[in-house]
Amino acid sequence: GENVEQHPSTLSVQEGDSAVIKCTYSDSASNYFPWYKQELGKGPQLIIDIRSNVGEKKDQRIAVTLNKTAKHFSLHITETQPEDSAVYFCAASILDSNYQLIWGAGTKLIIKP
Amino acid sequence: EAQVTQNPRYLITVTGKKLTVTCSQNMNHEYMSWYRQDPGLGLRQIYYSMNVEVTDKGDVPEGYKVSRKEKRNFPLILESPSPNQTSLYFCASRPAGGARGYTFGSGTRLTVV
C-alpha cells in the first residue's frame, strides 16, 4: 500500500526567510496531494492541494510542487511570518469516491523572530 | 458556521471504564472518520464511514467501536479503555467524491490512568 514519508520532522527558520517541507510517496497511482496546517490546540486545516496533472500550484505565499517521476512533492512558504508556526502534514491519495488519505508524520515549523 | 463538533475536549478516565466521544457535523457530509494523533506518529486512522450504516476499519481499530446511525453523528466508543489509548483524537468529515478537503474537529485529549 501507499506510504508517505515527510521531512524534516522539525524546521526552524528566521522570520522573513523561506521554508520548504518535502514528502515522498510510494504508490505511483497516487494522484492527489493535499497539505494541512495544524495550529496549537486545533484540528488540521487544508491549506493547499495539487493533482498529478499539475506540476506546481501557488496561493499567495504558499506553493506546492510535484515531481511525479521522483514521486515527491514539496510545500514552499515564502516570507515566513510568526503565524506560520504550526505543524504541517502532507498526504497522498488515489482520487476516487472512496479516497482515503495516507498521511505523513508531520513537520513542526518554528518561525524565529 | 460549518463545523465538526467533538465532545468532550478533555477527558481523564480509569482503565476499563467505558466511554464515548461524540462527533457531529452540520455540513451534510457523507464521509466521516476518526483519527488518533501521537507524537512522532502523525495521524492514524481508527475507523471511517462512507455513509449511514456503512463503517470500516482504518489502520488502528483495535479497542475501538463506532456507529453511524445518522448522517451527522459518528461517535467513537471505547468499551474498555487502556492506558495505551491515551492520545489526542480527531473526528473529520468531507463530502463524497472529488478533491474536497477534510474538515476536522478541535480534538479530544483523552488520558486513561
Image: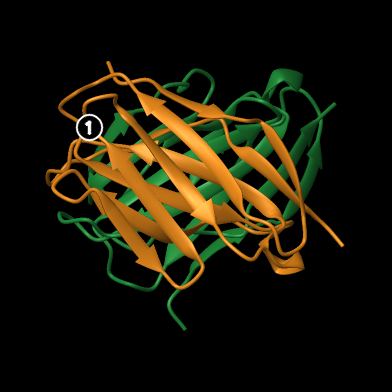
Chain colours: A orange, B green
* Residue A98 image offset from top left, x and y in percent: 17, 41
Q: Quadrant of the N terminus of chain A?
A: top left
Does A35 sit left or right of B101 as displayed?
right
Compared to B61, does A95 lie above or below? Answer: below
Q: Give the residue displayed 55% in from the left and 57% down from the top.
A: A77
- State how many labels appear: 1
Q: Nearer the viewer, residue B87 or A28?
A: A28
Q: Which residue occupies the extreme bottom position in the image?
A: B1
- Quadrant in which residue B5 is drawn: bottom right
Q: Which residue is mark 1?
A: A68
The structure residue drawn at horizontal position 69% and vertical position 57%, both measured from the top left corner, is: A17
The three-letter amino acid code for the residue at tag 1 is Lys
Residue A51 image offset from top left, x and y in percent = 21, 49
Element under disc 1: loop
Could you say where residue B39 lies in the image, as x and y percent from the top left?
A: 71, 29
State whether residue B20 appears in this view: yes
Residue B70, can we see it? Answer: no
Classify residue A103 as left or right of residue A26.
right
Q: Who is closer to the viewer here, A80 or B14?
A: A80
Question: Which residue is at the front of the view, A105 or B97?
Answer: A105
Quarter of the rendering occupied by the C terminus of chain A: bottom right
